[in-house]
Amino acid sequence: MTGSAAPDVRRPSAAPPTSGVVPPGTASAGGAAGAGPPTPGAEPLALDRAAQDLLFRAARTADAFTDEPVTDAQVTAIHGLVRYGPTALNGQPLRILLLRSAAARARLLPHVSGGNRAKTAAAPLVAVLAADVDFHERLPELFPHRPRARDWLGDRAERAAQARFNATLQIGYLVVGVRAAGLAAGPMAGFDAAGVQREFFPDGRHEVLLLMNIGRPGPDARRDRLPRLHAREVITTL
Amino acid sequence: MTGSAAPDVRRPSAAPPTSGVVPPGTASAGGAAGAGPPTPGAEPLALDRAAQDLLFRAARTADAFTDEPVTDAQVTAIHGLVRYGPTALNGQPLRILLLRSAAARARLLPHVSGGNRAKTAAAPLVAVLAADVDFHERLPELFPHRPRARDWLGDRAERAAQARFNATLQIGYLVVGVRAAGLAAGPMAGFDAAGVQREFFPDGRHEVLLLMNIGRPGPDARRDRLPRLHAREVITTL
């Protein structure tokens, strides 16, 4: 029912920071002090323009990074922000394995596809993102008003599907959080997930979902932004 | 390898807007005019505090909403922001079905679990979020520098898994976008996905992933924030 509209792909690469819905310079309701009171109805987004640019409009997936390290303080700050994103039953199944040492990086690279290997070797930080299939063990603490919630998830296959889905939502929040720290994320699906799982998660309770390079984008990190679908190609109203 | 640390669940509900990693009142690098120049190293997040609160720290999943409608202009603005979030091969498989009319809402409610039915009936707007399994048909436009990308996805089962994964990432971005509009999202997994799929997507090319109520949160929409896992329970470094 969607997807039948005529193709209408806009290319915002010509001027991404100013091609959006908010006229530049318009006062915004969610902005910092000094922006003045918002005009009701005049501003469809409450988020201020600088934040829109930082998180979405000017942010880009990076393939190359500077040598500047990503600190533990930055990672902790990113997590401290995005951990508030919602998950079903507040289950929070995402687990993050950071590869900092050369030895750890060397264990990963054989499982990464050829096209992703050099940039993964060079990135300041590489995160292996996985779902904890046994996340339900924590539900008595995380969802305390329903003490039986843990028992709802006795079926492993159903639980694994729920873990994957909610950990993936959390990866969406994490991409936003990395950008909130002024960094760029380089998510990569081109790797042997089963191999990475055997190498780093031999316990059998985790499913590896994605790799993500993280760092300050390098000067050659940006090619033209790829086209995005227009609202009328994606949204149907009944 | 994760999850073995001693339980350490912090409860930020006492003071969510100020319990984070950034000292209140600290100048932020990504903030609006007037905040002054940032102090290098003093601020782990570039995103200003007001935006952090709007999107994550003060934002909450809502179960009740005011009567204020969610306009098409708001929905278009939200989509116009979050469509820049990254997806594999720039495939953008998420499709959004908005149920505005009473007749459309009535078709949904029989498939919604009892605990979610009343709030779904009352929400200003309900979105059915689905993955387009045949998203690869658009790849020649969306990923033009690799004209063969469409052919890489000939296997339907693999393609469906990729569609689900990337559409779920996009739902993560969408939650952030709804909040960026000053609205609250109420994501719901408690429904009969197969039934909703038959009712609204009989074409067989879409997989329904989630329902989401959207609106201005009502005065009774907030219970205490549920506890979140601490970084050291979620992040392992090698």
Image (cartoon, coloured by chain):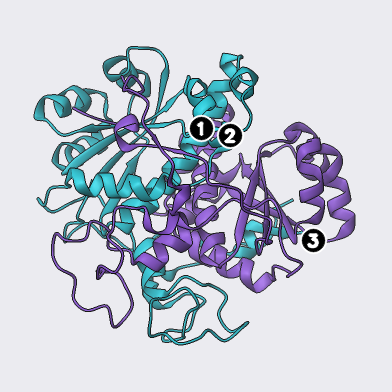
Chain colours: A cyan, B purple
The location of residue B126, given as percent across then percent down, is 73, 54
Q: Say which chain tag 3 marks.
A: B
How crowded pointer 3 is (Cα within 10 Å; few <14, some 14-19, many 20+) is rated as: some
- B216 with respect to B48 (left or right): right
Quadrant in which residue B164 is drawn: top right
Local SS, label 1 = helix
Q: What residue does disc 2 label?
A: A89
The span from disc 3 to disc 2 (Cα, nearest Å) is 27 Å
Q: Of all residues shown, which one is farthest toward the front?
A: B14
Q: In the image shown, does B141 or A150 lie closer to the viewer?
A: A150
Above or below residue A115? Residue A47 is: below
What is the C-alpha distance between the residues marked 2 and 1? 8 Å
The spot of residue B117 in percent (x, y) is 80, 43
> Circle 2 sits in a helix, a strand or a loop, which is it?
helix
The residue carrying mark 3 is: B100
Q: Which mark is residue A142?
A: 1
Q: Quadrant of the C terminus of chain B?
A: top left
* Amino acid type assigned to the residue bearing label 1 in the image: Leu
